[in-house]
Image: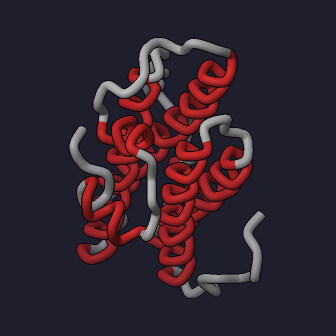
Amino acid sequence: MSSFFLGRRAFIHKSGLLLSGTAVALLAGRDALAKPANKNAESDVAILNAALGAELEAVAAYQVGAESGLLQKPVLDLAVKFQGHHKAHAEVLAGTIRKLGGDTVAAKAKYDFPVQTLKTQADVLRFAAGLEKGAVSAYLGAVGKFNDRELARAAASILGDEAMHWAILRNAVGEDPVPAAFVG
């Protein structure tokens, strides 16, 4: 994959991150590393696969919201945009896992979403906000566990995107978009 959010170059320049050549190559899907040579790489693959599974679930959840018929046009457009972000995250994570020599998790055939409780646009937005909050917490917990610090920095960048999604969705339903000084 040759892009991450706005494209590899834009991502590096706009994010202010100074990623190593290895990390950029991993995120761009280029050959930078051979098969996992040690337990550290295997551990990073496990973390990346957990993140990939969550991203695939988010893609499916936004699809449910988009197909619900409950979202009005501007909100539907935003949901599709956020789904696109999750697809981009998933593609980058999968490519990185493969470059590290790992096998990627697959999307589930069916997710157990509470569709029976989604009766209004606000219900869908609150559901999505809850998923985004969970993603923020998951990435926050994962960042410190990476052995490769450049992968940790990249995961932290995804965490920032998830936090923006969460804040925007909270705001859309009239809730305080930033309810606390810390996320946890």
Q: Is residue 36 left or right of residue 56?
A: right
Q: Residue 170 lies in what quarter of the image?
A: bottom right
Q: Residue 71 lies in what quarter of the image?
A: bottom left
| Residue 122 locus on image (x, y percent) | 50, 73
How many numbered discs? 0
Q: Is residue 97 left or right of residue 31?
A: right
Between residues 20 and 99, which one lies in front from this camera angle?
Answer: 20
Q: Residue 136 lies in what quarter of the image?
A: bottom right
Q: What residue is rendered at 66% in x and 38% in y?
A: 146
Q: Quadrant of the C terminus?
A: bottom right
Q: What residue is rendered at 60% in x and 52% in y?
A: 135
Taking 29 as reference, is 36 above or below it?
A: above
| Residue 79 locus on image (x, y percent) | 35, 63
Q: What residue is rendered at 40% in x and 21% in y?
A: 98
Q: Identify the colour scheme used.
A: secondary structure
Q: What residue is rendered at 42% in x and 38% in y?
A: 22
| Residue 93 locus on image (x, y percent) | 44, 36
Q: Is residue 7 left or right of residue 57?
A: left
Is residue 59 among what the camera can see?
no
| Residue 88 locus on image (x, y percent) | 33, 47
